[in-house]
């Protein structure tokens, strides 16, 4: 039996064909990815294309986030042919370094389905180098003890005009060592924007470098230097990877002249500018040598129980003002640790552990934050004498380890004489308990002391004033108490502006977030608050610096607070350093952000 002789079978096959045809017309969307290059080199860009076929609607993907590539999205395309749509998304990528780098997976939503690319590993060759660019990274000591600060010095030498280096990316992996604390020197914190300084993009952060000149074999080089202080936690031998630098150089024009834009205070970090403007930029790279550092353990022999943890050599000086005061008034104690190589790395134990203050002074539980000057760390704290019998501030003692002599040493200040005067001839502290009173109490009340003939209101009022004069004496103290707070803030604002800004930082943050309309305003408000509270210069502020500062203060921020800070700083830094020319956006709600930071504020003021 053939198909032609069976009409029922023909009808069944026709219906089956009509039913299957729509399925073939509306097949599942497909995602493909390809690159337009066969060879890859650090600093040389290529285009990564993502193509979605067979979809009616596609949500445009974001620029892939990866630390190994600079990325920028190109204009998407939608192609139609015979009722079918093809969505094409292209990204211009540029490898930051040589080696095996991975293109991350990208997820695209097409017709409410999630399509994902597979990770792709690229072998990236070394960048082009030139003798006109050099990197030097050194430690000032090759061997140190655990806890002993060591200074890292980074130098970039260029015989090319700095104004012609249009973008720069510096990778310094040793900034992220788990067993080290990394501290920004105070000189760099205060140098931002000063003559002879320049901003450098170092590992996504803004470092402040100093400018200078040097001659090597009769060739003149510009030299940019910045430093970091490393404090090792554990003993061991450490081998650090070399530093790498990638820059975009614009050679002189056809007439032999270099481009002379206004000298940058910060490299624009836009590695795609040459492609878009058709300028013939050249990508140059440079690398330093690797570093070795040996960290020795502190001796266990003869280690005092009250060892402060400070490793270094210096002296301690203490002063107190005023030295003559009335009981109840505070004494301002100033402790200076002088002569240490890196005073920024010194953490002084609380005062209660440095001397015996029990029964003599009221001492704060927490140590004040230091002010770092040229070669000393200055701690200022208030003490309150508890009685007129106190005659001096006792000598302070701090046990340190001196790496020069390999010995534990005790730094001691001299006792400071004090003269405590009583408050008047007789004060409450000097009254004997249970002293009898020579005045009888009228149980009927004060109005019953007025004679019966004093009935007119004026006489009654005068009598009431005479009898209530002790209450009027309370008016000045009440007013003084009411005005003490504003007066103290005004006095603090004039005498110690830094402390005043810290105390009012959260109130100013609340006002700023109330009027924040976008992510940039949120970031500016939070940056001002965090930099004030953690004593970090706003120019050098980053998410990592904030988390390190909180860790040093032993403040553990919860995951939600970390997520809010990460989104704010990542959005701002991605805009500044990633070359994006779009307005930053964030999903962090200002009220939610304020509530999270209020938890941190309570940690600062427990």
Image (cartoon, helix red, strand yellow):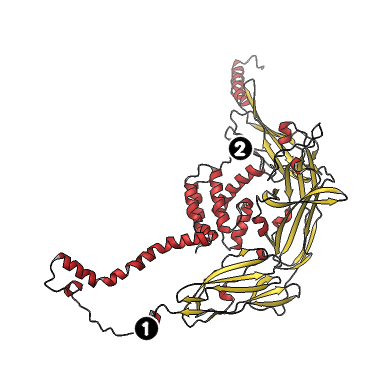
Where does the image place residue 222, in percent across and percent down from the top left?
Answer: 78, 48
What is the quadrant of residue 126 in the picture? Answer: top right
285 or 216: nearer the viewer = 216
Q: Residue at x 74, y 59 (%)?
A: 152
- Residue 515 shown left or right of residue 308 in the figure: left
Q: Nearer the viewer, residue 34 or 451?
A: 451
Badge 1 marks a residue whose secondary structure is loop
- Visible in this render: residue 365? no
238 to the left or right of 60: right
Q: Which residue is mark 2?
A: 582
Q: Nearer the viewer, residue 83 or 58?
A: 58
Judged from the image, the secondary structure of the residue bearing numbered disc 2 is loop
Give the mark, 1 or 2, whose residue is nearer the N terminus: 1
Q: Is residue 306 above or below residue 221?
A: below
159 above or below 550?
above
For image coordinates 69% across by 62% down, the residue present is: 180
Q: Where residue 545 appears, x then y in whole percent?
A: 63, 55
User: Residue at label 1?
Assistant: 431
């Amino acid at each position: 039996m053939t198909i032609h002789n069976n009409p029922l079978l023909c009808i069944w096959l026709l219906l089956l064909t009509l039913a299957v045809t729509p399925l073939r017309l509306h097949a599942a969307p497909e995602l493909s990815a390809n690159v337009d290059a066969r060879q890859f080199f650090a600093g040389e860009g290529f285009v990564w294309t993502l193509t979605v076929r067979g979809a009616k609607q596609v949500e445009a993907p974001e620029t892939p986030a990866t630390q190994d590539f600079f990325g920028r999205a190109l204009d998407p395309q939608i192609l139609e042919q015979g009722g079918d749509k093809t969505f094409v998304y292209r990204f211009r990528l540029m490898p930051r370094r040589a080696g095996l780098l991975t293109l991350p997976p990208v997820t695209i939503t097409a017709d409410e389905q999630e399509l994902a690319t597979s990770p792709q590993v690229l072998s990236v060759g070394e960048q082009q180098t030139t003798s006109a660019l050099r990197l030097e990274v050194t430690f000032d000591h090759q061997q140190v003890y655990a806890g002993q600060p060591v200074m890292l010095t980074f130098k970039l030498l260029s015989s090319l005009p700095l104004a012609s280096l249009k973008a720069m990316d510096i990778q310094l992996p040793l900034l992220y060592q788990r067993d080290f604390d990394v501290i920004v020197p105070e000189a760099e914190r205060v140098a931002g924007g000063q003559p002879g300084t320049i901003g450098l993009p170092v590992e996504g952060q803004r470092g402040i470098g100093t400018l200078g000149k040097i001659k090597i074999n009769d060739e003149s080089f510009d030299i940019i230097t910045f430093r970091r202080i490393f404090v090792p936690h554990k003993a061991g031998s450490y081998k650090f990877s070399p530093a790498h630098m990638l820059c975009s150089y614009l050679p002189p024009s056809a007439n032999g002249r270099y481009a002379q834009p206004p000298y940058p205070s910060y490299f624009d970090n836009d590695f795609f500018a040459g492609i878009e403007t058709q300028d013939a930029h050249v990508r140059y790279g440079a690398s330093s040598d690797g570093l070795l550092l040996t960290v020795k353990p502190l001796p266990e022999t003869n280690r005092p129980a009250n060892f402060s943890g400070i490793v270094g050599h210096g002296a301690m000086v203490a002063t107190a003002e005023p030295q003559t005061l009335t009981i109840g008034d505070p004494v301002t104690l100033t402790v200076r640790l002088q002569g240490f190589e890196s005073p920024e790395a010194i953490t002084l134990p609380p005062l209660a552990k440095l001397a015996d203050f029990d029964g003599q002074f009221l001492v704060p539980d927490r140590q004040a934050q230091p002010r770092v000057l040229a070669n000393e760390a200055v701690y200022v704290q208030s003490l309150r004498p508890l009685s007129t019998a106190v005659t001096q501030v006792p000598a302070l003692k701090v046990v340190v380890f001196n790496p020069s002599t390999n010995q534990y040493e005790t730094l001691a200040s001299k006792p400071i004489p004090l003269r405590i005067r009583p408050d008047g001839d007789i004060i409450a502290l000097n009254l004997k308990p249970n002293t009898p009173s020579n005045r009888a109490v009228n149980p009927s009340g004060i109005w019953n002391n007025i004679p019966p003939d004093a009935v007119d209101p004026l006489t009654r009022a005068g009598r009431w004033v005479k009898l209530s004069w002790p209450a009027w004496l309370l008016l000045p103290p009440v007013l003084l108490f009411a005005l003490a707070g504003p007066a103290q803030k005004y006095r603090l604002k004039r005498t110690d502006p830094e402390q005043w800004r810290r105390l009012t930082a959260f109130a100013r943050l609340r006002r700023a977030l109330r009027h924040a309309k976008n992510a940039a305003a949120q970031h500016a408000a939070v940056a001002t608050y965090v930099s004030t509270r953690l004593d970090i210069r706003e120019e050098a502020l980053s998410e990592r610096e904030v988390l390190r500062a909180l860790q040093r203060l032993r403040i553990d921020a919860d995951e939600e607070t970390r997520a809010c800070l990460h989104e704010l700083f990542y959005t701002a830094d991605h805009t500044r350093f990633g070359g994006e020319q779009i307005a930053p956006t964030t999903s962090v709600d200002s009220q939610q952000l304020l509530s999270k930071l209020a938890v941190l504020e309570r940690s600062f003021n427990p």
